[in-house]
Amino acid sequence: MDGQTDAEPGQQLEQPREAAEQEGRLWQGGQARSSLHLISALAQWVLLLACLVYLGVHFLRPSKPQSDKALWTHIRYSGRTTRGAAVNLSAESGPIQIRNGSVLVPCDGLYLLSLRSTVILEKEENWLNLTLQGSSSILWEQIVQGSESTVNLTTVLYLFEQSSIALWTSSNATLWDLSLSLVLVADSKS
């Protein structure tokens, strides 16, 4: 034959076997890579699921632990008022502070305010302007006429921390059994 050497029969059998073994090793290497990809993807899914569960539990839980100490005050007062002066209020109970007759607002938020009193005008007075005033604005105002009238107010107010609340009268009168309550319903951080 022209320049071709005949290979021995044993060599001819070994070449396909070596090619088959190499192909088998490549297949096993590919299978190992596929297994690693599968394990890696499974681990990523498990971590993603764990993160979602953690976030779900975190957002379903209240942002602040509820405490037994709600911010509130209750004021009781009976006494005479002076024209153009703030009523000298003092707290009967509750953690909200009163300073110089004014209720100090402890934090920004929504407050429930309740005011009830019997107003007895002095003999020379025909009417009285009862005003609940914050630091910068009038929160509520009512004109009282007649010698004896009942004042009743229940409202919700948004108050700011730097505010203080005072009760003013425009005439001399007697406030009998005044009850003023202020309760923080929701602070601005919740």
Image (spheres, helix red, strand yellow):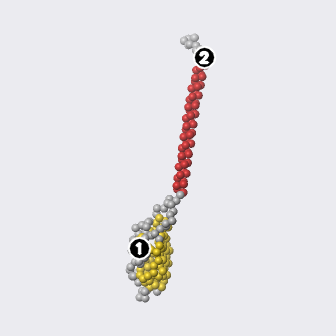
At x 50%, y 59%, the residue is 63
Give the percent coordinates (x, y) of residue 103: 42, 72
Give the percent coordinates (x, y) of residue 166: 41, 75
Tell me the CA gap for discs 1 and 2. 110 Å
Position of the N terminus, as image quadrant, is top right
State the residue position of label 1. 102
Local SS, label 2: helix
Q: Residues within 10 Å of mark 2 (few under 14, many from 20)?
A: few
Give the percent coordinates (x, y) of residue 28: 58, 31
In the rendered view, would you say 85 is above or below 123? Answer: above
Local SS, label 1: strand
At x 40%, y 67%, the residue is 162
Give the percent coordinates (x, y) of residue 89: 43, 76
Q: Residues within 10 Å of mark 1 (few under 14, many from 20)?
A: many
- Residue 35 seen from this side: yes
The kind of residue on which mark 1 rests is: Ser
The kind of residue on which mark 2 rests is: Gly
